[in-house]
């Protein structure tokens, strides 16, 4: 299992420093996040930054770690601009970009304050699928057009493909063993991994636990069948300050089948950039 760290708060300079220190202290990935103007108490007091700008800067000061954002809200991105930005960071990093993607949060004013943006969950899910389809077509190197319900374009061509031919995509998917939401899960199965969530009222409530990860990993293996290639299952959690306890936490999740642990600290009233830096310098646990 690999270990990544989410830079939830901080100036651009602090975020880039955090990425550099992630690499220096043994982490496997650095992730920022994708929001514009959040209409949510606490979160609206923190500035937001362009994720691709931050990741481009992080790519320039690192050599090894995976880079991404938790998560890219694709329905509010113009697909042609998204494709160009992702391709730029992919090449600048030597092919280290991954794309965790989702429908976006309905409290972002980039949805609610902009006429014509999809706001209903069903419409955002449809837009997510169409943007992903457009993005994949852009990696072919061929001239293409796209006609969809929410995204329609004439001819485009990106002559330079991603470094590795494609950029890994990890859609958010909701897991419920009793009532598996097939549309969400089937979308994730079409790509390279998934960011599991459960039904919950807050980001922490929506985090899947180790037992749910185990159920999901077994289900994914059954659905994909024998001989399927590698597939990432991304767990979001918070490691204990005690190294032995943290190692135990990580082993439990690794044994459940997760391929990534992402340190995920979001409380806007207590988490500071300085605290995040201190936590990064402790490094991931030895498992």
Image (spheres, helix red, strand yellow):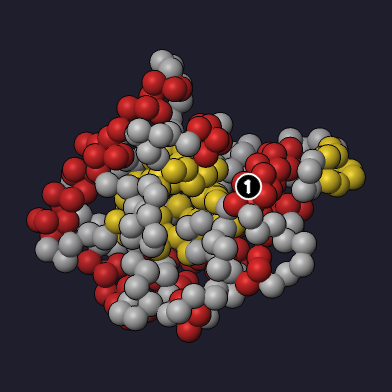
Report the side of 268 relative to 53 (left or right).
Answer: left
Report the side of 154 relative to 106 (left or right).
Answer: right
Report the side of 37 relative to 149 (left or right).
Answer: left
Q: Nearer the viewer, residue 98 or 114?
A: 114
Percent position (x, y) of residue 27?
33, 57
Q: Residue at x 34, y 34 (%)?
A: 177
Q: Nearer the viewer, residue 167 or 152?
A: 152
Helix, strand or loop at mark 1: helix
Say few, some or many: other residues with alpha carbon within 10 Å of mark 1 (under 14 / 14 to 19 / 20 or more). Answer: few
Furthest residue to the right?
Answer: 154
Report the side of 282 relative to 166 (left or right).
Answer: left
Could you tell me if residue 1 is visible in this image? yes
User: In the figure, 273 relative to 102: above or below?
Assistant: below
Percent position (x, y) of residue 274?
33, 81
Q: Residue at x 48, y 58 (%)?
A: 70
Q: Tag count in the figure?
A: 1
Residue 175 is drawn in which quadrant?
top left
Q: Which residue is identified by label 1? A: 122
Q: Nearer the viewer, residue 191 or 29?
A: 191
Q: Residue at x 66, y 68 (%)?
A: 112
């Amino acid at each position: 299992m690999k270990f990544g760290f989410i830079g939830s708060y901080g100036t651009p300079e602090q975020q880039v420093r955090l990425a550099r220190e992630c690499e220096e202290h043994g982490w496997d990935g650095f992730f920022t996040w994708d929001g514009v103007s959040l209409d949510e108490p606490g979160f609206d007091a923190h500035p937001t930054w362009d994720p691709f700008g931050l990741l481009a800067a992080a790519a320039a000061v690192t050599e090894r770690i995976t880079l991404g954002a938790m998560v890219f809200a694709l329905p509010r991105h113009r697909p042609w601009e998204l494709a160009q930005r992702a391709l730029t960071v992919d090449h600048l990093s030597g092919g280290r970009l991954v794309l965790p993607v989702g429908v976006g949060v309905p409290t972002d004013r980039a949805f609610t304050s902009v006429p014509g943006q999809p706001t209903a969950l069903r419409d955002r899910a449809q837009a997510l699928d169409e943007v992903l389809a457009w993005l994949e077509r852009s990696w072919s190197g061929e001239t293409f057009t796209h006609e969809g319900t929410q995204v329609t374009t004439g001819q485009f061509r990106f002559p330079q493909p991603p470094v590795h031919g494609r950029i890994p995509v990890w859609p958010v998917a909701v897991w419920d063993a009793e009532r598996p939401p097939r549309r969400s899960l089937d979308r994730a199965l079409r790509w390279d991994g998934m960011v599991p969530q459960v039904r919950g009222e807050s980001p922490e409530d929506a985090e899947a636990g180790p037992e749910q990860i185990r159920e999901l990993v077994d289900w994914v293996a059954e659905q994909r069948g024998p001989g399927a290639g590698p597939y990432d299952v991304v767990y979001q959690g918070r490691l204990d300050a005690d190294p032995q306890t943290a190692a135990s936490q990580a082993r439990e999740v690794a044994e459940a089948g997760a391929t990534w642990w992402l340190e995920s600290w979001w409380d806007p009233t207590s988490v500071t950039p300085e605290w995040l830096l201190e936590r990064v310098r402790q490094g991931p646990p030895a498992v």
